[in-house]
Image (tube, rainbow, N blue to C red):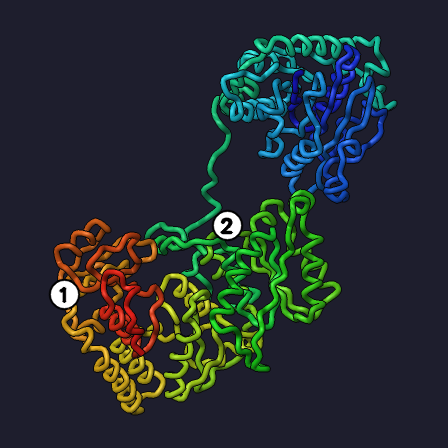
Amino acid sequence: MIQIAIYGKGGIGKSTVSANLSAALSDLKKQVLQVGCDPKHDSTRLLLRGANIPTVLDYMRDTPREKQQLEDLVFEGYGGTACIEAGGPKPGIGCAGRGILSSFEVMKRLGLKASSFDVVLYDVLGDVVCGGFAVPLRKEYADAVFLVTSGEYMALYAANNILWGIRNFEDEMPRVAGIIFNRRGLADEEERVFAFARAVGLPVLASLPRDEVFSQAEKTGKTLAEAFPSSATAGIFRELAVYIDTLEKDRSLLHPANPLEELELEKMILGRQESANKKVSSIVHSNDDTNGTEPCFLCTENVPSAKAPEEVPESPTCAASSRPLLYGCAFSGAATAAFHVTDAATVLHGPRSCAHITGDALACSFLKGGGINTIIDEEKQIPGLYPTDMEEKDVIFGGGKKLEEKMEEAISSGWETVFVVSTCPGGIIGDDINRAISRVKVHFPDIRIILIPVEGVLTGDFSTGLLEGCKRVADLIDPSIKPEKGLFNIIGERSFSLQGEEHFRIVAGLLQKLGYKINCRFLKWTDTHSLQSFKKAEINLLACDDPETRNMEAYLSGRFGLEFFELSFPVGFRESSLWIKTLAARLLPGEDISSLLQEQEELYKEGVEKYTPHLSGKRVLIVSHTEEIGWIMDTIKDMGMEILKVGITFSLFGRGSSGTLSSEDFPVEREYTDEKRLTDVKTLKPDIVLSSYAPSVPEDGVHYDTIPFTPQVGFLSGLELAKRWSTLLRLPVVEGWKYDGGAEN
């Protein structure tokens, strides 16, 4: 048994060659299976007297899996040949390459065995354009590959490209049979083909004339073996069939793939001495004549100021080189942004797994964070997530119809604003989401449908998607509204922080004492009404000071001309005191806030007095991934504890400028490692080690506590840790589970 793949440029005559070759093989009493691997599904037409047969992909799409059977896909053609057509999606929709993969998987699952035939012939679409169409090149499918070409440059270019594809799959066994020369009647055509054959080390196995007999046979829907068996051209196919019979017995006739480099091919066929490609330098001009640099219109730093929503560039944001590496994909980030608009639905266009992972994380965040307390009816509700649940057939045939149906489902459920977010598969196969939205808008013209233009990891990481989502949510902001006294917005709260709601309540409580109320949280548990009124706020506060939040600040201030307070949410007593004083001086100049500061100071001193008896004199080793730990050191000193050393470890999430701690009265060691920590625990003998992460194997004789990645904000942040340390240090270091004293209240 031998399996053969017929490859060549699209339109070069592969299907005609394949069908006539199968017919000639059947005349040699060979049991032949021909598999058409082209969306046009016309490979076997001449074997079936012009009939079209159901394709594997159509059958897979329309027939339930449990009812599928091989007999429905295999049809008998001329001379008893077995015929199968893989099929494919409509032009411009879906992924035909994925379709080939799926077709082979279906045929294998339904029990098709190549060993049941003498010859299996695969007629494959055009060139090796993607992994799907390269399936027949794999060793398990193709023992021998025939290249069909004419003397045209692009036909030879395709043949050379196929050789590159074969090399990717070829091991120690050569698999190229040779070239089938299908003449087009061009000048010097024979010279070109034979020159190419010599250069790549392949024989020209057959030379097919430009013969009218082909078109006459095709008019009757027959092969030459059936319509004109005595013709000279039919004889060429019989000779080729005999060669295949010999090849089946003697694989030493096969040749390795030795493709030419592109310039070498051009020189041979076109006579070029060098590439004609030249870089066009006049397309992009620099606006900066002083340094010759070109502005990056993709970066958020260059966002145009105070533009209306429709005028803002749709380009994705460049990742700043200083930004730490983040995980997740842009789909998840964009879905997170849309999810926090409580009176909007979000259609997740992608596979069920993508929607489940993101949806599960959002639902957990919602539940653990205390849910949503809506302004309208004070009821908790989870915003609607509508996954399209793309399946394999949607990747092959396109998921546009399913996307339309899911948008209509969301609208029918009462949502008046719908966001649409896409995963990688939709982008890879080129689903036209804008067209799907336009079709739905025809029936629901009053509904807001907003596309967030991301395509999973193809667009970038989580932070990229989150920013793109925030940009599209910002389309709901009314730019004409003027600020009003006494209102504030919060920008950039962490989406998955379990303490996020507590942080918001602390900050909102402090601002309430200054006479200010919340206007909008961008973007955390807000609604379209709050978003429309976003510009009512007199001041905008940043929840975090990180690159992602600063990018959001740059975008919003550039687009809407917003005013931001320069300090982010404070952590610790001293930082909070500075924060509230600076904010009051800006919002309420001349107003006395000493009573507020005194109230917070009394609460803090009360906590210090409570925990100092248990902590005073205790020795501390700090291991942190960031130097922004002033609030922790303040707490340690206020409790009368001693800092032995601070070690700064490497972390993708660490930030803070070097030298921040250099003036302190304890040693600071950067590039700190686990090995150094082990040594310091033994030599310095701390009572407690405060670390950004818990060691996998804690050392005996010392207590450990973690430094929170997202610490509590406000004046009393340090007291939360002091409470933990107080309880921890009263437990025995060894076998602490035996302690029965309970926790400190």
* Left or right, residue 16 beside residue 281: right
For badge 2, the amino acid type reads Val
Secondary structure found at label 2:
loop
User: How many residues crowd mark 1 within 10 Å: few (<14), some (14–19), many (20+)?
Assistant: few
Please name the residue that numbered disc 1 is placed on: 663
Q: Looking at the image, is mark 1 or mark 2 earlier in the sequence?
A: 2
Callout 1: SS:
loop
Visible residue check, residue 471:
no
Q: Is residue 549 above or below residue 206?
A: below
Residue drawn at the location 23% of the way across and 55% of the way down: 699
Q: Residue 40, percent across and down?
A: 74, 34
Q: Residue placed at 33% from the left, 69% from the top?
A: 711
Spot occupied by residue 627 in the image (x, y as percentages of width and height):
25, 62
Query: Of 656 and 212, which appears nearest the observer?
Result: 656
Q: Position of residue 622 (x, y in %)?
A: 22, 62
Image x and y of residue 425, in percent:
59, 47
Residue 109 in view of the camera: yes
1 and 2 marks in contact (CB < 8 Å): no
What amino acid is found at the position of numbered circle 1 in the picture? Ser
- Residue beneath disc 2: 457
Of 395 and 59, nearer the camera is 59
Q: Quadrant of residue 703?
A: bottom left
Q: Using residue 369 as the reference point, say whether residue 678 is left or right of it.
A: left
Image quarter hosting the C terminus = bottom left
- Left or right: 441 with respect to 680? right
In three-dimensional space, the C-alpha distance between marks 1 and 2, rounded to whole angstroms, equals 44 Å
